[in-house]
Amino acid sequence: MVGDLDVRDVWERLKADPASVLIDVRTRAEWTFVGLPDLSALGKRVVTVEWQTFPENSVDPAFSDRLKAALAGSGSDTTTNMYFICRSGGRSRMAAEAMEAVGFGHCHNVADGFEGPLDPNRHRGRLGGWKAAGLAWAQG
């Protein structure tokens, strides 16, 4: 069962486990215009595979196969701790559940994602998520 983890906990787990992987399932547009988590201080890079295609916003039926291909050669396997992140935690949960369904046993959802929930002014990135926690990120 996929569980939710706080972004700071995910950072610590990524730091403590050299084999662990952060998988960003947002769209290319989000990576480019909103930014990406920066794991360079941990000697890692984020794996980027879109869960949904843009602009159609339909789930990519080849997601699991594309993620397996992206992980090929990295030493990742069905026992690797994988942390899935999106904008606010919804798509990443579905992606983690999809990978769990094909045999990956250590899939975790990053609660509140990269930008977190909307604030009273309908802006993201201030109330929760990777950015609000002050974790490293870079503009795409």
Image (cartoon, rainbow, N blue to C red):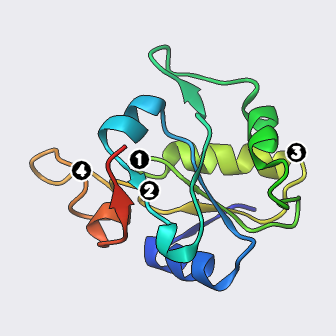
| Image coords of residue 46 (percent x, y) | 57, 55
Q: Amino acid at mark 1?
A: Arg
Sooner in the amino-acid sequence: mark 1 or mark 2 = 1
Quadrant location of the N terminus in the rendered image? bottom right
Q: Are marks 1 and 4 in contact (CB under 8 Å)?
A: yes
Q: Which residue is pictured at 72% across the width and 49% down the height?
A: 97
In the rendered image, which residue does mark 2 sit on?
A: 113
Instruction: State how far apart marks 1 and 3 are (Cα).
Output: 24 Å
Q: Secondary structure at mark 2?
A: loop
Q: Does dot 3 land on a helix, a strand or a loop?
A: loop
Residue picked out by circle 1: 87
Q: Is residue 37 left or right of residue 108?
A: left
Which residue is denoted by mark 4 in the rendering?
124
**How far is the residue under mark 2 from the one under mark 4?**
11 Å
x then y, percent, for residue 39: 50, 66
The residue at which mark 3 appears reads as 102
